[in-house]
Structures are given as C-alpha cells and as structure tokens.
C-alpha cells in the first residue's frame, strides 16, 4: 500500500502560515436525542489547535453523532458546538475551514476517484489542479481514472482522506478514517498539520489506532464523557493502595480531588502524589498495607472505561 | 458565489456516471419502437390511418408525456442515490444552509431532464421521419410543429425531473423514489379524475399532450387546456413535491 506523503508547503494552496487561523472545536453541554434515546448527554470538551485529539469510544458511544452536530448535519437538542467560536453553518467558507470525513465509503461506485474529487472541488470553488495534487499526496495518482467500485478498502479510505485535504483547511474532523495501517500512514501528515497549528479531531473505537498519533484524547461511552486530557498525562502511572478501609480512604482521597478506581480489593489513585496519599491516610487514621506505583496500560483502562455497559448514565472515573 | 459552484458540481455528478447513457439507450429504444410502428403498424382496419395526417403524425412524435415519466425516474434516481451512497454529505458540508444545495440539485436535474427529453423527442421525430418513406405518407408536421413538440418535451422533461427529484429527496431510497414517481404519475392521476372528473385535463399526461400542440381529436380527448395553462399545470405538479423535498431536507438530520 502506498504511503501518504507528508504535505509540503509548496504542494498546497495554503496561505502564509503566520496568518493561518487557530480554530478550536468547542463542545459545550451537548445533548442529542433520537426519539426517547439519548445518544449524547451533556458532553463538553475542547479540541485545541496545534493538537491531534483522539475521540475515542466503542461503536454506538455517540462519536459520529457528535461529529454530525459539529458539522450541522444534525441538530443538537441542547448545548452547542462551535469551531473558532462560530457554528459550522456560520463560518464564512465552511468547507475551506473544515475538512470532514464522516463516512469512509461515501462514493458512487461507478464514478472515478478523480471525478469524485472534482465534484468536491467544484462545490468548494477549488481548482482542478488541486485535485491532482491531493491524488498524488494520498498515492492514488495512478488509480485516479478507475471506478471507485474497483478500489480496495484502503484506497477508498485514502480517497476520502484526499477529499478532506482539498481545501487545505485548518480544521480536520475525521470519523473512523482508516484501519490501523491507514492510521499509521496518515500519522506523519496529521502530525505535521497539527504542528502547523491545525486542529485535528480523529474518532476511533480502538485506542491502539489513535494512540499512534493523538496528543489529546476524549473518551466517550454511551453518550457520556468518560475522561479527556493529554494522552501523556493519562498514560502516567497511578498509585496502587491497599487498605482494609477501602471505601473510607476512597472518600477521603476523592474529597481531596484524586481520581479513584477500584481494582479488586485495592484502589488505583490518579491525580495525587504517593506521599500525599500516605499523609492523608495517616491523617484520617487509616492503615495502609501497600502503597506502590501502578503501571496498568492505557489500553486496559480504555477497555474498562468503555466496556462499562451496565451503568447507563453513569460516568466512569 | 456558492450557488454556481454547487450547480457545477451537481451537473458533474450527473455526467460522471453511466446513468445518462442508460437513459439514452432507453430513448433510442423508444425511437426504434416508434419507427417500427410506422413501418409495420396498422389501425384496426389494416390501414395506416394513424399517420395519415399532420395531426396524427404530431401525436405520434409528441414526446412530452413520455418525457414527464422518464425524466421523473431520472430525477428520482439522481437524488435518491445521493442519500444511498452518502455523497449528499459532502454536498451539505459545502452548503450547510441546505436550500442552496437542494436548489442546485433541482436545477441540475431539471437541465438533465430537459436535455434527455429533448434528445428523446428529436430521436423519435427523426425515427418517424426516417420510417415514413416506407409508407405512402410523407412527413407532414411543419417545422413549427416539430419545434413545439421539442420545446414541450424539454419543458415536460424538466418538470418531470424536478418532480422526481422532490420525491427522491423526501424518500431518500432509490427503489422507494422510483415507486413514488410511478404512484404520482401513473396511479394517482386516474384516482384524482375518478374523484374530480373536471380534473381530467389537469393531470400530467393530458397537460403534456396539450403542451405539445396535439389536437384533442388526435389525442382522443374531449377537452384540453391552453399551452400557458399546461405549462402552469405541469409546473405545479413538479413544484409541490420539490417544495416538500426542500422543506424536509432542511429540517431533517443527515443520519
């Protein structure tokens, strides 16, 4: 499979980088219902410029719905989403501001890859030369005249990705854009764009895909925010605490701002230094049997967060 | 600036798949059937009375009623497949105020429907004219008559395509949209006439025939509306589904 090459300044229509706008995606108390079913509930987070934000959650967790609301393809029941402070529909030139890939198979199978992109270019007022540029960029130059129906899955994913790059937008919103191999191929290009100040939001139901490229992550489960923050911080080791007063110590530490997670008969504590945990336990008169660093993998935690299918409406730590 | 861009994109959508060629094949087949009818067809009495006058020949080449139906299917398929394939999503991303996109889509299918109908009418007229020398009759329709048949077909094709596109936008499923067009253009008109007998001249096929300038006698009807009324009538038949489609697209989530 052809690698997606890193886009160079010379190959784009991009204006002077110094005037390229920084546009955060801000989701504020978003709620979306379909009938009586709440698909997204009071969701708030920010995808920041200069960062690749991984939008994670199992299938059906509300990621795609959130992205559709971002792009005014679906209406919110409460809350709002803005891009650079404006709703998508109020952006002066929406498709030149945001490149979006919502369905990686949204093509007419009888149309060639080149014509698919030419249609997008026509609609967005982009020159046809740019179509050839992005076809080369994603490694589809030789296959551009072939029907999309004859493309492999990977080629279709790259064609979809090419469509998002046509207008060289400062914001990319990509919903499950590729398989793990494809993500690996996109990584350099997405990171380069983020380094240039672009805002990039990539959804996936697999942490391992997004872990390759994300700076920040937002984790969603059953429409609720589970956690968000810098990937590096979430990857930091936590502290394992064993005590006979698990419940009471948990309350003490939570009251002090720590994030507590039960692990068998022990507690996994995040957001609090080990010596602080020990001091607070001592102050509360709680005997500690073990106080050690805990290095459970992020994948384990992600699976625990997102496999909590029984606690509808409740947030994991 | 948005609308001309969107129209260009919609026209490119229509011309970059095999669908127009499939419709063109059908048009060639219809023209061939008409030519065959001229060469081998007879009235019940064994005569060639059905092509013996200019009015009869004009009735034979009048393509507008076929154009409404054919272009209706064209418009319905063109729009409904957008939803089926998901290609409507980038369109709405380019035009988040969706009425721009829908109006561009309606305009593009109207142009496509008019062109297909014009080609169909021209092929039919040419086939009939080419077949007539095998009979004792020459081609008797005046140049003005042919021009009116062509113009009526083009208008009827545009109207039919807009009607079909409106149904396609509401139904969003190709099979369902095709069924909807058949219901509206074939099943519903006789029901309307049964309920309101005075409406018999205001259903699509008689309106298209009247617009083509086919005389009531040649068309086998008692009464006909005027050409301007036929234009208005066909426009209403087209615009009602189109307006419903426009409203539903604006209100609905894209899921």
Image (spheres, coloured by chain):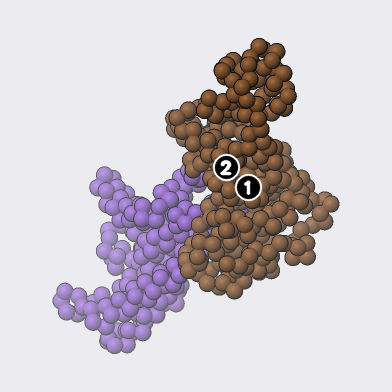
Chain colours: A brown, B purple
Residue A110 % position (x, y): 47, 67
Image-quadrant location for residue B12:
bottom right
Residue A252 % position (x, y): 64, 16
Front one among A218 and B137: A218
Left or right: where B199 falls relative to A75: left
Q: Which residue is mark 2?
A: A299
Q: Quadrant of the C terminus of chain A?
A: top right
Left or right: where B108 falls relative to B70: right
Question: In the rendered structure, are the residues bearing label 1 and label 2 in contact, judged by CB atoms less than 8 Å apart?
Answer: yes
Please identify the residue farthest to the right as the structure is shown: A18
- Tag 2 subunit: A
Image-quadrant location for residue A134:
bottom right
Q: Which residue is mark 1?
A: A211
Q: How many marks?
A: 2
Taking the spot 43% from the left edge, 47% from the top edge, the residue there is B170
- Tag 1 subunit: A
- Residue A261 shows in this picture: yes
Q: Which of labels 1 and 2 is toward the front?
A: 2
Q: Residues within 10 Å of mark 2 (few under 14, many from 20)?
A: some
């Amino acid at each position: 499979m052809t690698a997606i090459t890193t886009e160079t300044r010379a190959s784009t229509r991009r204006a002077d980088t110094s005037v390229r706008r920084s546009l955060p995606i801000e989701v504020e108390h978003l709620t979306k219902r379909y009938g009586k079913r709440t698909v997204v509930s009071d969701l708030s987070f920010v995808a920041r410029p200069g960062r690749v934000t991984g939008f994670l959650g199992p299938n059906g967790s509300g990621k795609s719905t959130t992205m559709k609301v971002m792009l005014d393809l679906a209406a919110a029941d409460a809350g709002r989403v803005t891009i650079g402070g404006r709703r998508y529909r109020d952006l002066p030139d929406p498709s030149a501001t945001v490149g979006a890939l919502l369905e990686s198979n949204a093509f007419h199978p009888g149309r060639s890859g080149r014509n698919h992109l030419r249609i997008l270019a026509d609609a967005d007022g982009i020159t046809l030369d740019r179509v050839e540029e992005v076809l080369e960029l994603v490694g589809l130059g030789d296959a551009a005249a072939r029907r999309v129906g004859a493309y492999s899955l990977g080629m279709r994913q790259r064609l979809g990705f090419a469509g998002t790059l046509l207008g060289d937008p400062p914001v990319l919103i990509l919903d499950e854009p590729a398989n793990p191999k494809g993500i690996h191929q996109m990584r350099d290009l997405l990171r380069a764009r983020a380094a240039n100040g672009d805002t990039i939001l990539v959804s996936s139901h697999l942490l391992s895909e997004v872990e390759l490229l994300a700076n920040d992550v937002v984790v969603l489960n059953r429409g609720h925010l589970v956690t968000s923050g810098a990937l590096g911080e979430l990857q930091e080791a936590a502290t394992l605490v064993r005590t006979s007063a698990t419940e009471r110590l948990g309350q003490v530490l939570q009251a002090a701002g720590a994030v507590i997670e039960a692990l068998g008969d022990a507690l996994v504590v995040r957001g609090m230094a080990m010596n602080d945990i020990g001091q607070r336990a001592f102050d509360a008169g709680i005997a500690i049997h073990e106080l050690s660093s805990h290095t459970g993998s992020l994948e384990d935690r992600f699976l625990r967060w997102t496999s909590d299918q029984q606690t509808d409406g409740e947030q994991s730590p | 600036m948005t609308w001309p861009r969107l129209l260009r994109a919609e026209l490119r959508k229509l011309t970059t798949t095999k669908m127009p060629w499939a419709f063109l094949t059908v048009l060639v087949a219809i023209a061939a059937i008409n030519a065959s009818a001229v060469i081998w067809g007879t009235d019940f009495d064994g005569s060639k009375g059905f092509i013996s006058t200019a009015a009869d020949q004009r009735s034979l080449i009048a393509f507008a009623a076929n154009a409404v139906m054919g272009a209706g299917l064209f418009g319905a398929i063109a729009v409904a497949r957008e939803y089926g394939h998901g290609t409507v999503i980038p369109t709405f991303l380019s035009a988040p105020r969706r009425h721009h996109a829908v109006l561009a889509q309606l305009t593009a299918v109207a142009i496509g429907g008019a062109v297909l109908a014009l080609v169909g009418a021209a092929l039919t007229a040419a086939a009939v004219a080419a077949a007539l020398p095998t009979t004792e009759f020459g081609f008797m329709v005046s140049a003005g008559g042919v021009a009116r048949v062509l113009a009526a077909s083009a208008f009827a094709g545009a109207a039919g395509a807009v009607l079909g596109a409106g149904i396609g936008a509401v139904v969003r499923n190709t099979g369902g949209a095709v069924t909807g067009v058949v219901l509206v253009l074939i099943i519903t008109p006789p029901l309307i006439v049964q309920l309101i007998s005075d409406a018999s001249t205001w259903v699509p096929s008689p309106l298209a025939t009247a617009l083509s300038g086919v005389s009531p006698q040649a068309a086998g009807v008692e009464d006909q509306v005027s050409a301007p009324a036929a234009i208005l009538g066909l426009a209403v038949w087209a615009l009602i589904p189109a307006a419903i489609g426009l409203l539903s697209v604006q209100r609905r989530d894209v899921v």
